[in-house]
Amino acid sequence: MATFISVPLKKSSEVDLVKPLSKFVTATYQGSEEQGEYLRAVDELNKLRKSALGRPLDKHDSSLEILLRYYDQLCTVEPKFPFSENQLCLTFTWKDAFDKGSLFGGSVKLALASLGYEKTCVLFNAAALASQIAAEQNLDSDEGLKAAAKYYQLGSGAFGHIKDTVLSALNREPTMDISPETVGTLSLIMLAQAQEVFFLKATSDKMRDGVIAKLANQAADFYGDAFKQCQYKDNLPKYFYFQEVLPVLAAKHCILQANAELHQSMVAKQKKHFGEEIARLQHSAELVKTVASRYDEYVSVKDLSEKINRALAAAKKDNDFIYNERVPEVKDLEPIGKAALAKATAVTPPISQKFSDLFEKMVPMAVQQSMSIYSQRKAETVNRLVGTMREASNLCNGVLASLNLPAALEDLSGDSIPQSIVEKSHAIIQQGGLQSIEQLIKDLPELLTCNREILDESLKMLNDEETTDNELRSKFDQRWSRTPSSDLYKPLRAEGANFRNILDKAVQADQVVRDRYNTHCEMIALLCKPENELNAAIPSANPTKTLQGSEVVNVLQSLLAQLDEVKSEREVLAGEIKAVTFDMSVTFLTALAQDGAINEEQLSLAQLEQLYGSYNQRVQASLHKQEELLGRVQTSHQEFSNLKQSNSEANQREEVLKKLASAHDSYVEISSNLREGTKFYNDLTEILLKFQNKCSDIVFARKTERDELLKDLQQSIAREPSAPSFNVPAYQSTPAAPAAGPTPAPRTVFSQQPQQPPAKAAPPARPPPPATTPQAASGPPINMPPTALPPNNPSPVAPLTQAQGPPYPAYQGYSGFYQMPVGYNPYPAAAAYGQYYMPYQAPPGQGYPGAPPSGQPYPGYPQQPPQQQPYYPQQ
């Protein structure tokens, strides 16, 4: 029977997966135990792509398995890496499978920063390779028939999957080979061939004729649908591939319908419906005759034709001599049923038999993003609880410092340094005193400047690339089809603006810390002095030893001890809160598997409430206890102040002690703020460096994409004509002008009757050639007379009814070749004058003649036929 149809593979450019994926893994899983494993998996994925796409593939199951494994890996990798133009940007370039290019440039290709595009093209190649493997099977064996059916159904399912997903995967216009119209047609062709294989299997197994007829009729129907799909889509006939496929589809439609009629005639014979048997055999013979006359170049129906003719002759003989039944019209016959055994194989990854996920331990990006947001929520909860306790402790210290406690209780002698002030002085000296704070304040501007420079450089790269993109877009207008940089960089610019806002707020916070330091620096310097100098700087007062051991002093000391205990409990509680850990990835993965999406807010808030609900209650209890104790301290301190002797020296001494206590608390807070500021700037530097790398990567990817697009545009411009077409003079298109010369006929022209060329009148003498304008002269030379060109691709042809036969294409062949008229004369000019050019014969005894006049042929040599040059009739 006819040769089966296979699909050519697409070709891809080389892409380095290692560098960008490794950079993402290193940045995301820094310090993780799985980092090394993920880096090895990235290298394996890159090797797998080279094996699948970087070399010619054999038409064997092992090659198909490699393609399917790579496709499965892409499906598992896609949700685990942030593949996009503005994050992890990988540009994949693929050529059109059917476009063979032109004289001035390569074939049509498309470059996109989309993993969905890569998946689509890889699946196309898997379907195409499956069709090639199926076409190589030995259909004389049972194993070959089963394998061919399996591969054709796989190809049909893969092409159908591309049809349903390509537009959403690319978010832009695809190349013609993977457009929904093209892959939809290919899916129908593969399904028809799978059904044909089932018909061949049934024939080989000698199943009942009724079953075989239904299988053949269904296969014919599938081929008819594929043929109509080709005819109705204007963009498919542009491919030479579909111009070659079109007659094969029509031929197979006829052949399988003829087989269906043949086997149904056998059913009629068994039922003793001899008139129906003859009618079906006649229809089958007509179909086979049509194939033999129109599509003999593609298929051979000799055996089938002989089989039908023998059966028809025997049936007619028996009917004429024995049965004498009336032969009904074909249109009056009962329609043959259909049995569809071929079904497109659904594409549900994993589809390879030896698949193993290289990134099995890596969670999807949806889980990673949910984990990131959960971490932020957790950090906010911890900071809120710890910050609330810290503010409460600072408030307590401030109230006690304003009351000069506990220094007032220790200073009952009036002339020695209170023990609490001595301890505060030693603590400040151990932490480095003023020098440590001044060094931290000095380092902040340098860190701030470094961060600003990184941010400015990152945004400058985006601005420069966007400027270049705008210039090229303005130059090439609609030809510059890639995504505008202004749209692509919006998320990055928003991120950069956020970083700028963070830096501005940090500058304001730094200024607040400096102002507070300037306020307390004098008293902090006093605490840094030796004890004798510190004691001399504190005013002395009259002794108040009479208050020692009083009830008021004892109450105050008890309350202060309770406040110290509360603050100690808070430090322990803060450590417990910071130590709480919980792995939310399991919860998010479960939700993603069950619902297909993650409600991060609901899950995170519920888990945080479960983890920190009890701690929140303990923090609130600590605040209430401190508030109660401070109220009692203020009441007792009022009684204590009334008992003390009021004099100016005592007031001055107490005021200095209050400032010293407040200076210590301010020193501790300022040091903490400055260290937090230094850590903040250092952490921000790492974040900004990642942001800079992200900007650098996308700018580099855009530059690569820009270079590819510029190269394609240059080739496209080179293929365009250098000058517009010009009007041909009217006298060149007169009806009297004869045909110019031979044009090769297409080898796929069908159902065209020979035509005799019209008689040619003798032309008048040729005048000089007409002058052409400079603009016309710059265009391509005209070496053909203005004859009517054949039409372009034929209009869609609707199939005829079953009774009248299959849809036959008005096939014109591919563009550039025209029908050769029958009776073609290779010497039109000589024939027009009624003679051929004859070689020169010199008279006896004479030599060669002299040189001929200018423009005349040299006598004595055989003349070449005219090279299709137009002659110009007299005006």
Image: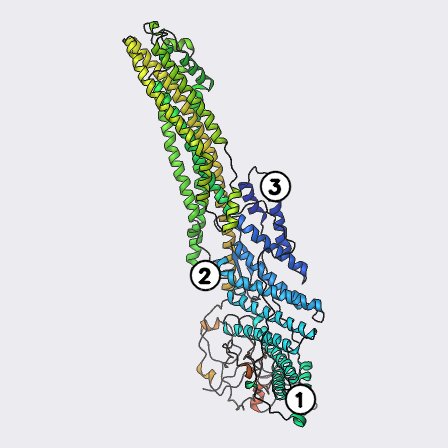
Q: Secondary structure at mark 1?
A: helix
Quadrant of the rendered structure where residue 402 is?
top left
- Examine the rendered structure and indicate whether residue 421 appears above or below residue 449: above
For the residue carrying disc 2, how many other residues have a C-alpha within 10 Å: few (<14), some (14-19), or many (20+)? Answer: few
Q: Tell me if residue 445 can be seen.
A: no
Q: Earlier in the sequence, mark 3 or mark 2?
A: 3
What is the spatial separation of the Cα atoms under label 3 and label 1, in whole angstroms? 78 Å
Tag of residue 520: none
Asked whether 272 or 466 is in front, the reply is 272
Mark with earlier residue (3, 1) = 3
Q: Mark 1 or mark 2, which is nearer to you?
A: 1
Looking at the rendered image, the quarter that the C terminus falls into is: bottom left
Dot 1 crowding, Cα within 10 Å, few <14, some 14–19, many 20+: some
Give, as a three-letter code, the residue at label 1.
Ala
Colour pattern of the rendering: rainbow
Q: Which residue is mark 1?
A: 315
Residue 864 picture quarter: bottom right
Q: Where does residue 488 sit, x and y in percent of width and height?
A: 44, 51
Q: Position of residue 858 (x, y in %)?
A: 61, 83
Residue 118, image x, y percentages: 55, 56
Residue occupied by mark 2? 479
Q: Is residue 392 placed above or below 55 in the rendered structure?
A: above
Q: Amino acid at mark 2?
A: Arg
Identify which residue, 794 or 272, lies in the foreground: 272
Residue on which the image places disc 3: 36
Report x, y in % for residue 48. Answer: 63, 52
